[in-house]
Image (cartoon, grey):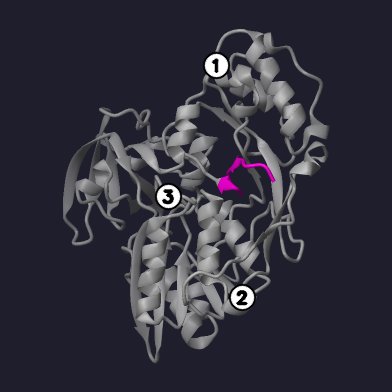
Amino acid sequence: MKKFTWIFGLAFISFWACDPKEDPVPNPSGDLVKSAIYSSMEEWYFWNEELPPAPNGADFESNQDFLNAITFKPLDRFSYITTQEAFNNSFVGRNAGHGFGFAFDADDRLFLSFVFSESPAGKDGWERGWEIIEINGQPISSYRTATGSYNFNLGPSDPGISNSFTFRLPDGSTTTRTNVKAEYQSNSVLHQEIIDLNDKKVGYWVYQSFKATQGQSPTKSVEVDQSMSFFQAAGIDELIIDLRYNGGGSVAVAEQIMNYLIQAGNNGKLMYVNKLNSLKTDFLGTGTNFTKLGGLSLDGVVFITSRGSASASELVINSLDPYMDLVLIGDNTFGKPVGSFPLSRYNRTLQENDVELVPITFATANSEGKADYFDGFPADFMVGDSPQFNWGDQNDLRLQAALSYIQNGAVNGRMINTYFKPKWEMIDAFKGLKQEFPAY
């Protein structure tokens, strides 16, 4: 199998997801680039047999508009165009911006949902659970659009751009902070701890994105190694993995995580297989098998999920499902059983014009052949999000429900009654490259 950089925003020999910067949309002049886009899609696009006849490139203002006109609309919500630099930065989490996420609670109050520790927001001490009551002096309601979504008008991710935020802190006090966007390295592990639950040691791991550590060969995450060593040293009996805001990333890292989680008895068994279009059957191997790492021995895993749990997150769930008892708590996942690898390396015109074409090029299936989950994986227990509580606070409804399941084998009706479908979710505010790791 030839070496590709596959992404789940899905997949592998190195899968990479997308950079949280605003998506640049390169548009070199002339029809030559648009012709190169179409010919590359004819060769590599997963649904290449569904391509329409080549449209007139002059009818489209941008390359992205041209791509949108030829993608397979019933299923493809994901193909995009960016620059080679922006795509490559995503490999190791080199970001720019404020470095945080938003989420609404059941009462339509807006909270910080996560903060990257080395970002401008993280360095200013911001934390999950802070309520945002004003942005640039305007109440949150003023940013609601006619469609019911939100546009917070925070500008591009360029360093030097500033915005002002007024917060209500957990103690009831308020503070106004002006924050300046900058380049930063994002962390994938937002929180980890050991929770003593009666006679069990429960690991709780909040994992935000499948990013690799720069300079590692083979591709892997040092953060993942450190977390798994932490849980193994503690002798955990159960593990809760919180993927509620994890939009995807490197499938090489997803494989790394799965190899830590799989039982020793399943070492060497099939993890997943890839499927490309009918022109590319020579690139298919026999699939990827588990290679056990570490000494964790778990019968199952409890996942906390939401609509923000996408692509590589779903690959982990789908690939482990035939071998472990998995329970999903929170909300249904996003629904992305397909993935991409960048095509500029196979087309000189794209490469010379700094156009990175990243269309859907493959699908994945687990060892039982399950490959079609465009509607996402349904949660076993639907429980509302509660971003007003910081990581590890057991008042957090989804964490509380996960612990309840581990202790009692069920989630009580009181917790299930907390479920609500958010009117706006951050993953829907972004497209293309940035939808993989949505962050402001």
The answer to which quarter of the image holds residue 54 is: top right
Characterize the local packing of mark 3: few (<14), some (14-19) or many (20 or more) Cα atoms within 10 angstroms: few
Magenta part of the protein: which range? 1-14
| Callouts 2 and 3 close, C-beta under 8 Å | no
Pointers 1 and 2 in contact (C-beta within 8 Å): no
On the rendered image, what quadrant is the C terminus found in? top left
Q: Mark number for residue 216?
A: 3
| Amino acid residing under circle 2 | Met
At x 65%, y 69%, the residue is: 268
Viewer-side label of 1, 3: 3
Instruction: Indicate the position of residue 287 as horizontal and vertical percent values.
Output: 71, 57
Q: Say which residue appears at 62% left-offset and 42% top-offset.
A: 3
**Which residue position holds label 2?**
324
Residue 138: x and y, percent? 29, 36
Mark 1 vs mark 3: which is more N-terminal?
3
Q: CA distance from mark 1 to mark 3?
A: 29 Å
Query: Which of the 4 image quarters holds residue 273?
Result: bottom right
- Which residue occupies the foreground of this view, 173 or 186? 186
- Measured in 3D between alpha carbons, the distance from the residue under mark 1 to the one under mark 2, in whole angstroms, is 47 Å
Horizontal side of residue 23 vs 140, given as left or right: right
Secondary-structure class at tag 2: loop
Secondary structure at numbered mark 1: loop
The answer to whether residue 202 is above or below residue 174 is below
Residue identifier under label 1: 353
Amino acid type, mark 1? Asn
Looking at the image, residue 10 lies above or below residue 370: above
Residue in the image at 58% along x and 66% along y: 291
Residue 429 makes an appearance in the image: yes
Q: Residues within 10 Å of mark 2 (few under 14, many from 20)?
A: some
Left or right of 147? Residue 370 is right
